[in-house]
Amino acid sequence: MDIGIGLWGMQSTRSAPLPHPTLYKRLAEDAQTAEDLGFASLWLTEHRFWYDGYLPSLLTAAGYMAGATRTLRIGTGCLLLPQHDPLRIAQGVATVDQLSHGRFDFGVALGYRDQEFDGLGIHRRDRARRMEEALDILASAGAGEPVTPQGHVVSPRSVQSPVPIWVAAVSDNAVKRAARRGLNVLLSDAHDDRRAGDLVKLYHETARESGVDSSKARFGILRYVWVDESAAAAENTVIPRLRSLLLEQLGGWRYLSDENGQSLGFERPEALRKAAEGVIRNNAAIGTPETVIRRLKDLAAVGVDFVVARSHLISQTQPQLYRAMELLAKEVAPALADSGKA
């Protein structure tokens, strides 16, 4: 099992306000630290039209990271593909892969916030169609095939052939979309281990029905991860911050759902808090190295071979983050090296 580190969204929140030039400077510093510690990759995240300046331009930031590092892979977790012009994205992906000398992992997602689609003048109901069309263009670009009616190809091509594409999967439909194309899957941090295992099985079943070889597909997942020398220190350091993050952003964005599948916002504070506590309890690995190793090995047991450890929680200081990253890299990652796929 490989471990990447994430998610960097360059947010200046009310609980941790910082000038954006400082945040972008720290992105380079954090990436260099992740590289020095031996992480497989560092992952960026995209949204737009939110008060905190959430990173709206992933490929620009990915290019910046490419210049700041030499060996670290750069991942997008995830670019909201239906909100973009797919040809420009295909060109941008090839450019970032050139800049990084083949160190790019391109994660894509549908997007779900009405405000983002409305602000861009795109109908949210068209997102699935736009996603399929964009994935077709990316596949053609990666194969060096024409991407316009006039026969134009993307040039220069990417160094990797093709750039690995990861499809963010919250729903069954997203998993099936990835499986029909043989693409990698990045499962949501809203999924517990059992649900993650069910989605891995669904992927293989759908691929088999579609005549797609799924033997080389990779299954990643987002997980809130924080490692400390003691369980009490970890809980006191990170759980209040994680709770604040979940309640503010996911409440404002209506990302979490209740037991009936109804989206939760600020108008239902008790239900929102209950859902957030469920994420912390079931979908996070927080504590000593031994605790985190055990929680992540449970994921390997259901077929997950890659974890994006969400240790960047915005409100932590750089020294706190770097210590947690160091423990994750030196104490946890070696114990997971033989779990799942290499």
Image (cartoon, grey):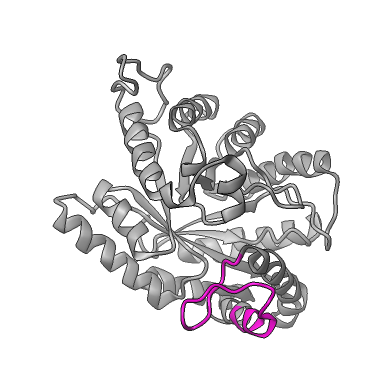
- Expressed as whole percent of the image width and height from the top left, the position of residue 277 reads 63, 81
Give left or right: position of 213 versus 195: left
278 relative to 327, above or below: below
Q: Where is residue 324 in the image (x, y as percent from the top left)?
A: 69, 63
Q: Percent position (x, y) of residue 170?
A: 44, 63
Q: Which residue is drawn at 73% across and 56% down?
A: 322
Residue in front for this viewpoint, 120 or 86: 120
- The quarter of the picture where residue 319 lies is bottom right
Left or right: residue 30 versus residue 70 is: right
Q: Residue at x 55, y 47 (%)?
A: 117
Name the image quarter holding the C terminus. bottom left
Location of residue 247 in the rendering, given as x and y in whole percent from the top left corner? 69, 72
Q: Which residue is located at x 32 percent, y 48 percent?
A: 183
- Of residues 211 and 2, the one drawn nearer to the viewer in this rendering: 211
Look at the image and give the residue range highlighted in magenta.
254-275
Return the residue nearer the eye: 271 or 123. 123
Q: Residue at 74% x, 58% y: name it.
A: 314
SS assignment for the magenta stretch, majority: loop
Q: Report the label total.
A: 0
Q: Is 62 rendered above or below residue 194?
A: above
122 versus 317 height, above or below? above
Q: Does the magenta stretch include residue 200?
A: no
Q: In which quarter of the image is residue 208?
A: bottom left
Q: Report the side of 331 relative to 125 (left or right).
A: right
Q: In which quarter of the image is the N terminus?
A: bottom left
Would residue 189 be visible to someone looking at this image? yes
Q: Can residue 38 be seen in this view?
A: no
**In the depicted structure, whether residue 268 falls above or below residue 34:** below
